[in-house]
Image (spheres, coloured by chain):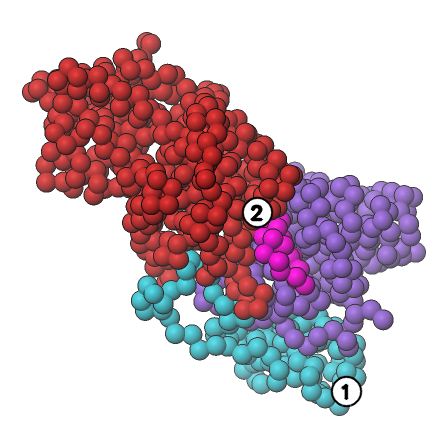
Chain colours: A red, B purple, C cyan
Amino acid sequence: MSEKMFICSDEAVALGAKLARPQVIAAYPITPQTIVVERLSDYVEDGSLKATYLHVESEHSAITASLGAASVGARTFTATSSQGLLYMTEGLYYASGARFPIVMMDANRSLALPWNIYGDQRDSLSQLASGWIQLYAEDAQEALDLTIQAYKVAEDPEVMLPVMVCLDGFVLTHTYEVVEIPEQDKVDAFIPYQNYANKMDLDNPTSNCITAGPDYNLEFHYQQHIATLKAGEKLIAADKEYGELFGRTYGGLVETYRTDDADAVIVTLGSVAGTTRCVVDALRAEGKKVGLLRIRCMRPFPEKEIIAALQHVKAVGVLEKDIDHGCEGVVFTNVNSALMRGTTKPATFNFIAGLGGRSILKGDIAQCFDKLLRQAAGEPQSPTVEFVKLGC
Amino acid sequence: MGLNAQNITNEELFYGHKACGGCGAALSIRLVMKVLGKRTFAIVPPNCMSTVAFIYPSMTFGCSGAITPFAGTAAFEAGVEAGAKELGLTDYTVVGFAGDGGTADIGLQSLSGAIDRGDRIMYICYDNEAYMNTGVQTSGLTPYGAKTTTSPAGDRLPGNTKAKKNVFEIVAAHDIPYAATASLGYPEDLLNKVAKAKAVNGPSYIHIFAPCPTGWGCASELTVDLAKKAVDTGLWYLAEYENHEYTLNRNPKEFGDVKEYLKKQNRFAHLKDEDIAEICRIRDAKWAQMRTHWNA
Amino acid sequence: MNRPQPVNFVPPKTLAEYPVGPCCPSAHIVGINAGMRTFRPIIDHATCVHCLRCFLVCPEGAIDKSEADLEIDLNYCKGCGVCAHECKVGAITLVKETEA
């Protein structure tokens, strides 16, 4: 029987990681990720998790030690946030290029400057091109489930790529919820240990993480691109199989909510989707045709799903905790790019909110919908990137 | 009896590389690998050696190996060691081969972390006294008076203006189980230090003085000769740190001719007599400290 | 001669023939380095005392000690001259490749 626990998302991730039985954990503490590594240290100490925990001296070494562990075929887990993720950047590209199925939790946090420890998504979204599968959880249960599913996708022989499980700093990491904990034997059966085809081997010596010059470089990247796309299919399959085993499914790369006949849809990631869902229900009760599309997977980018769900919508707003200064939010760039390939393109708008942990309240989301509904009603709205609740 | 040319294996585990003729770094790896054998994970950051050894499809290590991020040689090694241990592998060595810049500068933090944790890894620094792979730029281990492309010699400066960073003692200060310095001029001494390091159940460090004819501007046949002269002139030293103590392995009564050593290398060709006097002053201060505080 | 030999490498043509990520079997040398050599070392076996100093200090490992007479793997010797310089009995001479 699975048991239920009242825990925060950091603890949920730690439990998910423990259930996945990583053999090596290399991590460096950073707020708001710390609870994850504290719990994992406890599990290693009390013997409930048989693993080596490496107390590395930096995030650069956390990811580099993870590379080393994965290079010999060990299942590996790490976790970080914000500046730590940026300090890992070199290793992120390394991991995906090497095709090492490392799983990492990122506690989404603002990037300095200005210094700020609270949640936004500028850290992970700055690493979309790093080659990692990038997943976003909405609540503690999904954070746990995604951590387990991450290994299923990462270690699939047709994928062999690292996976980043992202959850909003504090709003998720430090918020307590009731979470159902899967049974260990069923998790073991779901993600049996895989022998990595590209590992260094003592009996059949292999050279790894090597140089590929102009004659071969493009092909290695093409191969990685194909594998990343494949990961999308594998995530959908993993979600389905997980549902059969544990009774919870999330619907694949995106989750749509009341979008079928919607005139206006907000696209977002992470915990703000929960608030948006409430606003959708309230506006629907007023007869307004609004919906929500939550992106669960930013890489591979769910282009087909987004086109299918949104190409006939009149107005689409991307609400994101991110800004690519001098341009727009990077989620918006991605969504827009996908919609360009549809048969019809909705009017699209970008809402920047929640930076540095500023709350995104129902009223803020309702205002975004208001703008979209005006557009949908034939009243053209300004295409300028909108900073929600700007105080100046 | 210790290891020597007669009893060391004929098998080559670093072969067919594209290094320059007379490469001291390549000779360092070759000799170390002869002691370590095939059941080794050779971890190399981006440097001349990874460049000449790991270009697809040409692989010159006879054992498993990988290129790591530049700053993370020891961290990568630590991960390999942790993974191998958890997977139940036995009878193997994890070794890193980094240059002077990869060790004394960019790699120092991760090296310190690994030694502090007590990870069972071996770390070899092949010291050719500058960033050679990028075209001879000054590093923390470039000696006083050496001309590099970023420490040019002219009317105002004599080339590099500071002495070598004391990495051997920085490493030893962690109270590492075993650390040593070596020189390609004394290859048997090197082989036996590697054998000692291999047996250590914890971190070990060997700092090899390894000339680079291309970067030093000397004839390629002088690699081993200059490495020996560096020791004989006292500009390098052979020492060990174990059981919490330093030991000088060679303590010459008289030093060899420093000027003769320097003048065989274009990087020192510009030195004036007063610069050479400064080099000797730095040397003598170092030896006074070692002779006072270390076992000899 | 007991030295590693170059492999006959056929470049991958399809994606399936590529390794998973940039990796490759070790001890997989493609091509030879003889073209880097200007001078060729020649051992005078009558003078050689088999001290093996040259074997020990060759940066390439190109000197094979498995036979009674030392043998130089000219596929991989770069002609750096360390062997000749280090030979204490003068048994190795360097000859210009064009005259060898």
- Image height of A132 relative to B27, above or below: above
Q: CA distance from mark 1 to mark 2?
A: 57 Å
Residue beneath disc 1:
C47
Please state the horizontal and vertical placement of residue A329, each as a whole percent of the image: 30, 28
Task: Give the magenta-colored segment's residue range.
Answer: B78-96
- Left or right, B296 with respect to B158, comes to right
Please state the horizontal and vertical placement of residue C96, each as a whole percent of the image: 59, 80
Task: Report the chain holding disc 1.
Answer: C
Q: Quadrant of the N terminus of chain B?
A: bottom right
Task: Report the chain holding disc 2.
Answer: A
- Left or right, A99 with respect to A346, comes to right
Residue A161 magenta: no
- What's the residue at 74%, 54% (across, down)? B201
Q: Is residue A196 visible?
A: yes
Query: What type is the residue that disc 1 sits on?
Result: Thr
Q: Label 1 neighbourhood size at 10 Å, few (<14), some (14-19), many (20+)?
A: few
Please state the horizontal and vertical placement of residue C54, each as a whole percent of the image: 72, 75
- What's the residue at 17%, 30% (across, down)? A259
- What's the residue at 69%, 87% (across, down)? C67
Name the residue nearer the viewer: A262 or A241.
A241
The dot on residue A24 is 2
